[in-house]
Amino acid sequence: MSQLLVDVHAKPQTEEEKYERLAIVAHQTREVLKDKATVTCGSCGKERRIIHCCKCFYCGIFYCPRCSRIHFKEEDL
Ligand SMILES: [Zn+2]
Ligand SMILES: [Zn+2]
């Protein structure tokens, strides 16, 4: 997936970068509606069970536990 080229943890600077994030959200939403169990992490691209993922309140992207720590800047905890 092209999402791996996007640094989703950085603030989007251009319209194109905003659309890239929206594309990730749209892809994940399709996954959720399809099997209601798994979703592809918006950062590392690994498939994870939804109950183990966090959805960011701001960008709306799902992240696996590992990438959630990076996204929510809690890597030091
Ligand atoms: Zn991840
Ligand atoms: Zn976010």
Image (cartoon, rainbow, N blue to C red):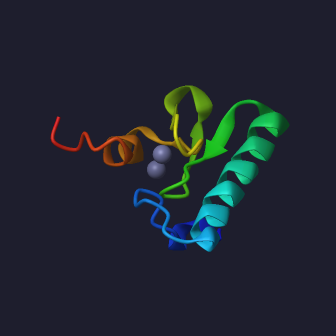
User: Quick check: 70 left or right of 1?
Assistant: left
Q: Against 13, is 48 above or below?
A: above
Residue sitting farthest toward the left? 76
Q: Position of residue 77 (x, y in %)?
A: 17, 34
Residue beneath the point at 63% across and 72% down: 16
**In the displayed image of the protein, which residue is found farthest to the top?**
51
Is residue 57 placed above or below 20 in the rendered structure? above
Residue 19, position as x, y percentages in the image = 67, 64
Relative placement, left or right, of 77 versus 73 is left
Quadrant housing the N terminus: bottom right
Residue 30 placement: quadrant:
top right
- Residue 18: percent from left, percent from top: 61, 62
Q: Left of 73 or right of it: where is 51?
A: right
Residue at 52% x, 34% y: name it.
Answer: 57
Residue 69: percent from the left, percent from the top?
A: 32, 41
What is the number of callouts on the image?
A: 0
Residue at point 58% right, 68% down?
17
Residue at point 52%, 40% (across, down): 58
